[in-house]
Image (tube, rainbow, N blue to C red):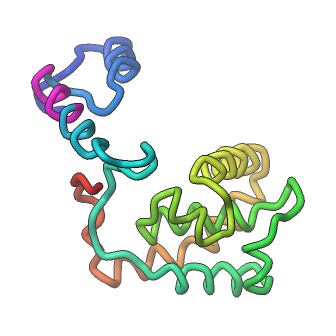
Amino acid sequence: MDAGVAGTDEEFREVLKGGRWAIGSEGFCNWVQDRYLALLHGRKSREDVAFRRVGRWLGAEEILEHVVNACGVDRAFIGRRNRKGDWIRPLAGRLLGKYGGKTQRQVAELLGLTTGAAVSVQQKRLEGMMKENAGLRCRIAQIESPLAAREQKSGSNAQHLSFKG
């Protein structure tokens, strides 16, 4: 970003649209693409390769236990298919990715979903529900807050990006 990939906000938006894996110089973008393709080689699915944050994460069970307690449901509830308006299972998936460092495929396995794509669909649905419902946004922020504090307390260095495949 320091090199200045665009002079105006409009130019920057165009650069973002064109950058599939990265934005920056042509050489950097080519390097990232080559790295991605190298990671992809020999994998069964694109879901097996991710550019993930690497760091210390909270444990999946710790996160799920927190969701269960904060929402007043039993553990089996999170693993069951629930009604369309339910937000607890998608929230568990969101927190597993954000504070547990899990890929969508790993989240799917933990929540009893069939694919990582199902997790993505749930995340989009949750975001839509949060956008429309201020009370839900507030409730989710309250549930998420202790996890954010625990992550900071654990000395997470998850903000650094690296390639993991």
Magenta stretch: give its range. 26-33
Task: Establish if 77 lies above or below 128.
Answer: below
Q: Residue at x 76, y 61 (%)?
A: 87
In this rendering, the answer to whether 19 lies above or below 138 is: above
Q: Is residue 47 above or below residue 60?
A: above
Give the image quarter of residue 131.
top right
Q: Residue at x 20, y 35 (%)?
A: 32
Please state if 84 lies on the left or on the right of 146 as rendered: right
Q: Position of residue 33 (x, y in %)?
A: 23, 31
State the predominant SS element of the stretch in magenta: helix
In front of the other: 51 or 46: 46
> Would residue 138 be counted in the magenta stretch?
no
Q: Looking at the image, which residue is at 73% across and 74% down?
A: 78
Q: Let me know if residue 32 is in the magenta part.
A: yes
Where does the image place residue 119, in percent across and percent down from the top left?
62, 54
Image point (63%, 72%), residue name? 142
Q: Quadrant of the C terminus?
A: bottom left
16 relative position to 135: left or right: left
